[in-house]
Image (spheres, grey):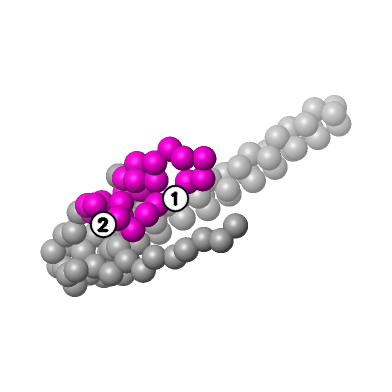
Amino acid sequence: MLGSVILIKPMMPMLSQYLRIIMTTPHAFGQLISASGSTAQPAIYIRDIKKILFPIAPLAEQHRIVAKVGELLTLCDTLKARLKDAHTTQVHLADAIVEHATAS
């Protein structure tokens, strides 16, 4: 199957990181799904993409949004690491309890 790629160029100054953030939101995803129609072979046509509206914040706000999303992603990574460590500790404790119980 052959596909096509479309280059999306914003009409105003925009941070690429901000564009990536808004393009991965549930709102944007919903608009892209709606634009793809309900054919057997999903496709999004240029004429449909031109109709999609995305929220564009002023440049200063884009910087703040990108920074905040970066902070939140770092926090998520930290929480994932802590959860993994807690799970490992839980497994070690369970193993120790079982070992102690079978040794008695």
Inspect the image, locate mark 1, and give the three-letter code of the amino acid beneath it.
Ala
Q: Which mark identifies residue 50? A: 2
Q: Which residue position is annotated with label 1?
A: 43
Residue at 21% over, 64% down: 62
Magenta segment includes 41: yes
Residue at 30%, 55% (x, y): give it: 47
Residue 24: x and y in percent read 37, 53
Quarter holding the C terminus?
A: top right
20 shown above or below 37: below
Would residue 63 be found to the left or right of residue 74 on screen? left
Towards the viewer: 20 or 41: 41
Task: Name the quadrant containing residue 37.
Answer: top left
Compared with 53, 39 (above or below) is above
Q: Residues within 10 Å of mark 1 (few under 14, many from 20)?
A: some
Extreme residue toward the right, this view:
103
Sequence-wise, the earlier of marks 1 and 2 is 1
Circle 2: element type? loop
Q: Which residues are magenta?
A: 28-54
The residue depicted at 56 percent of the width and 61 percent of the height is: 2
Single out the residue that lies furthest toward the bottom: 13
